[in-house]
Image (cartoon, coloured by chain):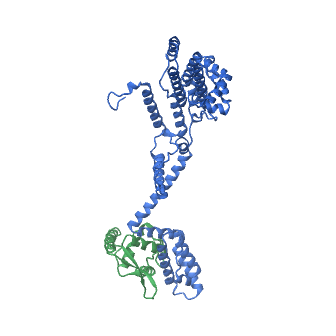
Amino acid sequence: MADIRENKDLRNLPACVCEFIRGVVKKMRYRRKVRQDVQNELTAHFEDELKEYKTDEERRQKAQQLIAEFGDVKLLAVLLRRAKKRCRPFWRSVVARTFQAVGILILCLVLYVIWFYSGGPVITTNYLADLNRAVRPVADETLNAAPIYDQAIQKIKAVPDEISELLGETYDEATPQQRQRMQQWLRDNRELFEMLAAGAQKPYYWREYKSNDDTAEMMAVLVPDLQYFRRLVFALRWWICTSAEQDRYEDAFSGIKSLYCLGQHLKGDSTFVEQLVGIATEALAAGTLRQILWDHTIESATLAQLQRELQQIVADENFTISLKAERLVTYDVIQRSFTGGLGGGHIIPKSLDRFFPEVTIISTGQEIRARDRFIYDAWAALRRWGYILFLHPDKQKTFRATEQFYDYWEKVAAKTPAELIPASPGTL
Amino acid sequence: MKSVGIKGIAMKFESQLLKGIAPVVVLEILSRGPMYGYELSQAIEQRSGEILTLGKGTLYPLLYNLEAKKLVRGRWEEATTGRKRRYYSITGRGEVELAKQKAQFKELNAGLNFVFGGALSPA
C-alpha cells in the first residue's frame, strides 16, 4: 500500500491518537486517496473533541476515552472500508470485478496447466509383444531364414571400406580395375552367397523385435540391420552381374532367386521401412534380371526353367502392404502420449515434443524480419498451446481416429491399381 | 447504534429496537443544515435532550453508507474556525427518504399509543 501523507495536525494530537488513526487507516487497505480522506476526517474529529482540554494529561485521558468509544481498530477499519467501497461509482466496481474475474481465470489457468503438466502415461498394453506375436508364424525355428541372414550380416559387416564403397557402384559404372577388385572379393566370399541361397530356401522369415530400453516402447524398436541388408543386396547384385558376364548363368539366376526371396522375406507383417526395403530388393532383382536378358543371349530352355521357378516363388506372394506394425506403433505412441485419467485422459505436453516435433517453416528465400518472425512464432505458439490445452481430442477419440485411419488405408492398400480408379469421384 | 443512554440514568435500549433510528436521526439533523462529523454527533445529543448519543464507532461508517446511498453529500470546506472539515448535507433523495421514514415513525408511534393507552403521548 502506498504511504499517505500525514496530516500535519496529527502531530499536534496525543501519541495514542496518532497510533489509533494510523492503525485504522492502515487496516482499511483501500485506495490511497480514500485513506487520506479518512485520516484527515478522523484527525479533524479528534482535534475538535480535544480542543477544550489544555493540559497534556487531560488531553491524553480524553483521547483514550474517545479511542475506547470508537471501539476496535480492526472492526472500525472494516466498517469504513465497506462503506467507502459502496461509495465508489458503478464503473469502478465493474473494473474492479473484471480484474478480479481475470485474476481468478488466470489462477484457474495456472492450476489447470500445473495439473495438465503433472499427468503421466498409463501403459496398459505391450504392443511390442503383440507385434512379435503377429510376425511369428506358427512354425518351427528351423524354418526361419533369420539366423542364416544374421550370419550373412556378420560377414558383410566385416568388409573393408574400399569394398563397401564399390558395392554401391553398378557393374556397368565400375572401371575395369574396380571390377577386377570386386571379382576377387566375390571369389574370396563365395560362402556369403551360399548362405543367402540357403536363406532363400527357407519358407519363413521372422525376427524378434526389441526395444533399446526396458520400456518396450515401440518407437525405440531397433531395426539395426537394415543398412547391412542393403550391402548384402548390392553384393548379391555384383555376384549376379559378374556371374552373367562370365557366362555362369546358373549362378546368376540362382542369385536372382536368392535376391528376390530376400526381398520377399523382408516384406510380410514387418515394419513399413522393412517392407519398403523388401519391395526395393524385389524390384532390384527384377531389374537386374531384365538387364541380363537384354545384355546376354540365353538358351530358351534355361529361360523356361527360370520362368517356372520364379512363378513358383511368386505364386503365393501377398503384394499388399501390411500396416499392422505401423498401427501398433501408433497405438503405443498414443498410450504413451496421453494420461490415463477419467474421460480418456489428456495429452502429455512432453510427448508432443518427442513424437510430434514442430514443423519449421521453410523460408521462401525472402529475408524474414526478426520482429515478424517473433510475431508469427508467438501467434503459432498461442494457437498450438490453446489447442493442446483445451481443444485436443482425448485418448479414446484419438484411438478411434487412428483405427479409422488405418482401416481406411488397409482397404486402399488391398486394392489393385485398376480398382483404385473410382467409378465416381469421391468414392473408393 | 452501539451506545445509547440517558445521562444519569442507566438504560440500555435493545439494539434491534434502535436499528433503523440512527439514519433517520442523522438525516433529520442534516436537513436543518450542513454539518461535519463532530458537529453532527454534538447536535444529535443536544437536540435529543441527551437521550440519544451516536457511538463514535458508528458515526463515520453511517455517514459513508448514507453517502453511498446518495442520501447525503460530503464536501471538504473551510469551517468557521478556519480549519478544513468535511461537511455533510442532505440531498433531494435524502429528503424524500427522510419524509418517508418520519411518516412511518408517526404511524408506529400512533399505533403504540393505542396499545399503551395513550402513555406515549407527550404530556
B21 and A56: which one is in front?
A56
A253 vs B75: above or below: above
Q: Residue A152 is drawn in which quadrant? A: top right
Q: Residue A165 in the image: state x and y as whole percent.
A: 62, 33
The mark tally for this picture is 0
Q: Position of residue A428 (x, y in %)?
A: 37, 28
Chain A drawn in what color?
blue
Tell which chain the image draws in green: B
Residue at the spot 49% in from the left edge and 52% down from the top edge: A109
Up-down relation of residue A408 to residue B111 (above or below): above
Q: Is residue A210 visible?
A: no
**Residue that protrudes farthest toward the front in the picture:** A176
- Residue A228 quadrant: top right
Residue B110, given in percent of the width and then of the height, sits at 31, 70
Asked if A351 appears above or below A145 in the picture, the reply is below
Q: Is residue A12 left or right of residue B86?
A: right
Query: Which image quarter: residue A421?
Result: top left
The percent coordinates of residue B49 (x first, y second) are 42, 81
Q: Is residue A198 visible?
A: yes
Tell which of B97 and B6 is nearer to you: B97
| Residue in front for this viewpoint, A197 or A378 | A197
